[in-house]
């Protein structure tokens, strides 16, 4: 267990404000939050835990003066910057519910969340966000009344974050602040996370203090780190992983959060800070591996050979640990020497030399990437969970792991497999249900409390869970983002030329698509424009049709968020049907059949520059 700090109550009774009060009182001089003041700033600005609590108290008064009340939702669309992190805590201390919206969300998705949440206030970053949010103020179906803008220069007539803080400083009353947070109960909502559903409309997952505090305490027991360790916070706070790792766990551990406003700059932050812990979605680990491979390619042959020999020793050592065996003394000694002489110099250059805990989740890790890092003495602990389970359900840990699996259940979580292999789970970290537009909650579990996760898996004889398939049709990209394929496909099919579409991108960094011309509408569209083509295949190759299809995809992408956009596509020359196997008798896509039939073509859409 990492944290030996005093808990301000039993784990199931802790609230987030109680942790901040403890941190300020008992660890007040320790660094809590650091950030760079601008994209080119060299120095870090740091707040201690006592300073964090003082600023949170002032901000809470500012939000009170703005009219924010207990129980209401406040939307936020900002990057990983102090205004976001501190506002999140300030709202919780009022009993309000912070709801972060992905910065890549399309206007239609923002409107849905604003309408569904009934939020009256949104806190946004700057001009880019303002263009998407400002029209909602005039939408009669949306409750939104006020925008608070972090970048003062972009605020125009809207309230600035700075003025909100200033009003809090003028009106702050310590007794009112302390009274407000002490009224918070473990069963109260701590946040709502909107996650994509198969219909395309994001669903509001309501998570309580108890859900997330138990998640933090139990996850902490699987990690062995120095107390008050640093965490590089770069994933969006709209993602449950960063909410747990970048807000709730640091509050539990009195740890030090380093905000990385630009996710693409995370490698530079790692090189600078040499962290002892690092969480990366699969795509991040893939990119880091590609960087290391590129460096290796430039090394002299003798040095590469020494590194490869060290890699073999590291993998052999990991194999013993994976099987629960004691590492032979001779192997341990040889590995230690090889690590010091061959591996550590390169790891030090990348900032990876001090890592004690490395993990991944949100999408399955490619086993070749896992094995690559095992060859450097870095064992990536893959985990599995959902927003609905407040984060992870299963984890690998240093004393119990299987590379390629997603580990064993954490304390308090039960798993069982349905007849079709779907993984069911229950426990105190599982959410109560999805938020309804009227503020009530729709139960998503059965009468015995089992929640169907939509994932298919198997449990081995040692209790490790292995994911084998996904019952849901949701795509999870290598960046850990959920995408509804039906939403993307239906959007692009709105053009009359396109009759069928299938998007692909599970475990990949972007989406590609297979498009099929509409057998009836496409010839009519062509004839109206004087295009002569005897067959659908010939029509698919016509330059004018190709240009129109490019415009159709571009128009669809304009209505989708960045993760949902189609980056590359291929136009097929034959229509899909039940007789050829791509469609069911009821004309639904048989995705597995299409994936198998066009596997080479789909791979080529990623391989070709």
Image (spheres, rainbow, N blue to C red):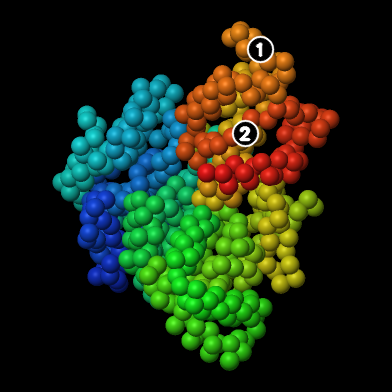
- Image mark for residue 88: none
Is residue 572 left or right of 58 when viewed as pictured?
A: right
Front in this rendered view, residue 213 or 605: 605
Residue at 76% of width from left, 54% of height from top?
421
Q: Say which quarter of the image contains residue 328.
A: bottom right
Provide the secondary structure element on which disc 2 rests.
Answer: strand
Foreground: disc 1 or disc 2? 1
Residue at image mark 2: 570
Could you give the CA–CA distance between mark 1 and mark 2, rounded to whole angstroms? 22 Å
Is residue 150 left or right of 144 when viewed as pictured?
A: left
Residue 561, x across and y down, in percent: 47, 36
Residue at 84% of width from left, 30% of height from top?
579
Mark 2 burial class by Cα count in 10 Å: few <14, some 14-19, many 20+: some
- Image mark for residue 532: 1
Residue 246, x across and y down, in percent: 40, 58
Residue 29, x across and y down, in percent: 24, 70
Tell me if residue 50 comes above or below residue 548 in the rendering: below
Residue at 52% of width from left, 37% of height from top?
567
């Amino acid at each position: 267990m990492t944290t030996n700090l005093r808990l301000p109550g039993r784990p199931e009774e802790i609230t987030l404000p109680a942790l901040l009060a403890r941190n300020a009182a008992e660890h007040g001089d320790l660094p809590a939050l650091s950030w760079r003041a601008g994209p080119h700033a060299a120095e870090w600005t740091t707040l201690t835990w006592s300073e964090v609590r003082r600023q949170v108290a002032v901000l809470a008064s500012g939000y009170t003066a703005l009219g924010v009340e207990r129980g209401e939702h406040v939307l936020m669309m900002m990057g990983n910057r102090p205004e976001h992190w501190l506002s999140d805590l300030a709202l919780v201390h009022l009993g309000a519910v912070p709801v972060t919206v992905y910065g890549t969300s399309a206007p239609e998705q923002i409107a849905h969340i604003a309408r569904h949440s009934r939020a009256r206030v949104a806190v946004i970053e700057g001009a880019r966000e303002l263009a998407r949010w400002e029209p909602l103020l005039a939408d009669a179906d949306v409750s939104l009344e006020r925008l608070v803008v972090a970048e003062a220069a972009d605020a125009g007539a809207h309230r600035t974050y700075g003025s909100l803080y200033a009003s809090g400083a003028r009106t702050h009353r310590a007794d009112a602040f302390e009274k407000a947070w002490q009224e918070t109960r473990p069963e109260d909502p701590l946040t709502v996370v909107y996650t994509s559903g198969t219909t395309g409309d994001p669903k509001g997952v309501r998570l309580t203090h108890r859900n997330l505090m138990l998640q933090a305490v139990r996850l902490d027991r699987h990690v062995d780190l120095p107390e008050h360790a640093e965490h590089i916070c770069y994933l969006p706070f709209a993602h449950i992983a960063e909410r747990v790792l970048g807000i709730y766990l640091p509050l539990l551990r009195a740890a030090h959060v380093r905000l990385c406003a630009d996710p693409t700059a995370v490698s530079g932050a790692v090189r600078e800070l040499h962290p002892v812990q690092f969480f990366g979605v699969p795509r991040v680990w893939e990119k880091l591996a590609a960087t290391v491979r590129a460096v290796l390619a430039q090394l002299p042959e003798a040095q590469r050979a020494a590194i490869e020999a060290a890699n073999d020793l590291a993998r052999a050592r990991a194999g013993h640990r994976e099987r629960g065996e004691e590492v032979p003394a001779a192997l341990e000694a040889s590995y230690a020497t090889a690590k010091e002489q061959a591996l550590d110099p390169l790891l030090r250059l990348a900032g990876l030399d001090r890592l004690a805990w490395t993990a991944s989740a949100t999408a399955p890790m490619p086993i070749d990437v896992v094995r690559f890092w095992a060859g450097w003495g870095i064992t990536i602990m893959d985990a599995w969970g959902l927003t609905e389970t407040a984060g992870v359900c299963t984890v690998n840990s240093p004393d119990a792991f299987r590379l390629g699996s997603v580990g064993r259940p954490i304390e308090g979580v039960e798993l069982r497999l349905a007849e079709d292999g779907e993984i069911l789970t229950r426990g105190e970290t599982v959410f109560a249900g999805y938020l309804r537009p009227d503020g009530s909650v729709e139960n998503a579990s059965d009468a015995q409390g089992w929640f169907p996760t939509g994932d298919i898996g198997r449990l081995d004889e040692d209790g490790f869970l292995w994911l084998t398939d996904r019952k849901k049709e949701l795509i999870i990209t290598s960046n850990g983002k959920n995408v509804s394929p039906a939403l993307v496909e239906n959007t692009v099919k709105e053009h009359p030329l396109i009759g069928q579409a299938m998007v692909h991108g599970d475990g990949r960094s972007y989406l590609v698509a297979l498009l099929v011309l509409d057998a009836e509408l496409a010839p009519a569209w062509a004839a109206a424009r004087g295009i002569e083509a005897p067959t659908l295949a010939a029509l698919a190759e016509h330059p004018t049709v190709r240009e129109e299809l490019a415009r159709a995809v571009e128009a669809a992408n304009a209505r989708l968020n960045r993760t949902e956009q189609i980056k590359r596509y291929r136009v097929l020359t034959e229509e899909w049907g039940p007789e050829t196997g791509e469609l069911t008798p009821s004309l639904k896509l048989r995705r597995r059949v299409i994936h198998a039939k066009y596997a080479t073509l789909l791979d080529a859409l990623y391989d070709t520059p």
